[in-house]
């Protein structure tokens, strides 16, 4: 039995129809799995509370306090990975952000000079 068709355009249309049909079926399957997902947190919508007529003026927000404990832990782990102990760390302090920018610019200029 020979081939049903030898028209390349018809074969391309059939193959693309199959591919996009499978993609659509996978999209529907993903949507169904998302709807019945038992691990998804169910959030109850809070009841709408009436807002007071005259709300007091909000105090100006204070600057957010940065929690550097994660950054300090990463720095300590990096130092420990190089073979140093935690006792050898004298202090960890935040530098102004400008120093990172200046350092990056100097490094970019020096690398550019090395390339040419």
Image (cartoon, rainbow, N blue to C red):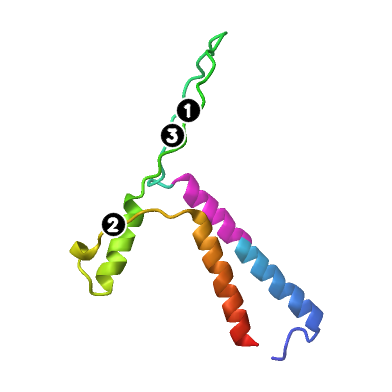
Crowdedness of circle 3 by 10 Å Cα count: few (<14), some, many (20+)? Answer: few
Q: Are marks 1 and 3 in contact (CB under 8 Å)?
A: yes
Q: Which residue is mark 1?
A: 45
Q: Quadrant of the C terminus?
A: bottom right
Residue 108 x, y percent position in the rendering: 59, 74
Q: Nearer the viewer, mark 3 or mark 2?
A: 2
Comparing marks 1 and 2, which lies closer to the viewer?
A: 2
**Part of the protein shown in magenta:** 24-36
Q: Quadrant of residue 53?
A: top right
Instruction: Report which residue position mark 2 lands on.
Output: 91
Tell me how far mark 1 sits from mark 2, CA to CA: 47 Å
Residue under the image location 51 percent in, 19 percent down: 48
Q: Nearer the viewer, residue 48 or 78?
A: 78
Confirm whether the magenta stretch covers residue 35. yes
**Dot 3 or dot 2, earlier in sequence:** 3
Q: Residues within 10 Å of mark 1 (few under 14, many from 20)?
A: few
The answer to whether 54 is drawn above or below residue 30 in the figure is above
How far apart are labels 1 and 3 at the CA level? 6 Å
* Residue holding disc 3: 43
Name the spot of residue 80 as percent of width and height, x first: 25, 69
């Amino acid at each position: 039995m020979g081939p049903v068709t030898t028209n390349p355009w018809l074969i391309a249309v059939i193959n693309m129809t199959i591919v996009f049909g499978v993609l659509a079926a996978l999209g529907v399957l993903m949507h169904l799995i998302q709807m019945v997902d038992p691990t998804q947190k169910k959030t109850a919508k809070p009841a709408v509370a009436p807002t007071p007529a005259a709300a007091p003026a909000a105090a100006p927000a204070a600057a957010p306090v940065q929690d550097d404990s994660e950054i300090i832990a990463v720095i300590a782990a990096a130092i420990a990975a190089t073979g140093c102990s935690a006792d050898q760390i004298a202090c960890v302090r935040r530098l102004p952000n400008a120093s990172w920018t200046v350092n990056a610019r100097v490094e970019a200029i020096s690398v550019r000079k090395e390339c040419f």
